């Protein structure tokens, strides 16, 4: 479990904000599929699936 410290790509930040992913949100990695597949994360009581490229834009402490 961690807390989002920063979203580093501006082109992805708007989409993530629409999904309810903000700086300071608590996140937990649920599942990572192999070969740069999607990641399933738990954010503020919501289960969200992100592309690998989108997930790389999120910095977690």
Image: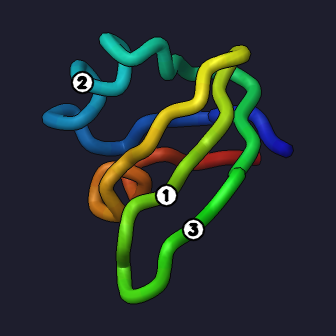
Q: Of the residues under marks 1 and 2, which one precedes in the sequence?
A: 2
Q: Is residue 60 left or right of residue 48?
A: right
Please name the residue that numbered disc 1 is placed on: 39
Please name the residue that numbered disc 3 is placed on: 32
Q: Position of residue 42 (x, y in %)?
A: 67, 34
Residue at point 49% right, 57% down? 39
Q: Of the residues under marks 1 and 3, which one precedes in the sequence?
A: 3
Q: Nearer the viewer, residue 23 or 29?
A: 29
Task: Please report contact status of discs 1 and 2: CB closer than 8 Å, yes or no.
Answer: no
Q: Residues within 10 Å of mark 2 (few under 14, many from 20)?
A: few
Task: Please report contact status of discs 2 and 3: CB closer than 8 Å, yes or no.
Answer: no
Task: Please report contact status of discs 1 and 3: CB closer than 8 Å, yes or no.
Answer: yes
Identify the colour scheme used: rainbow
Query: Which one is in front in this view, the residue at disc 1 or the one at disc 2?
Result: 1
Q: Residues within 10 Å of mark 1 (few under 14, many from 20)?
A: some
Q: How much space separates mark 2 and mark 3, taking CA atoms?
A: 20 Å
Q: Is residue 15 left or right of residue 32?
A: left
On screen, residue 26 above or below 53: above
Quadrant of the drawing holding the N terminus: top right
At numbered mark 3, what does the secondary structure look like: helix, strand or loop?
strand
Q: Nearer the viewer, residue 46 or 61?
A: 46
Please name the residue that numbered disc 2 is placed on: 15
Q: Position of residue 40 (x, y in %)?
A: 55, 49
Residue at point 35% right, 63% down? 52
Q: Is residue 28 left or right of residue 57?
A: right
Q: How much space separates mark 1 and mark 3, taking CA atoms?
A: 5 Å
- Identify the disc placed on residue 17: none
Q: How much space separates mark 1 and mark 2, taking CA atoms?
A: 16 Å
* Residue positioned most to the right: 1
């Amino acid at each position: 479990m961690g807390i989002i410290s920063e979203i580093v790509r501006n082109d992805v930040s708007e989409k993530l904000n629409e999904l309810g992913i903000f700086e300071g949100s608590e996140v937990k990695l649920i599942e990572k599929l192999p070969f740069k597949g999607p990641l399933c994360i738990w954010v503020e009581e919501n289960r969200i699936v992100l592309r690998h490229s989108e997930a790389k834009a999120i910095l977690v402490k």
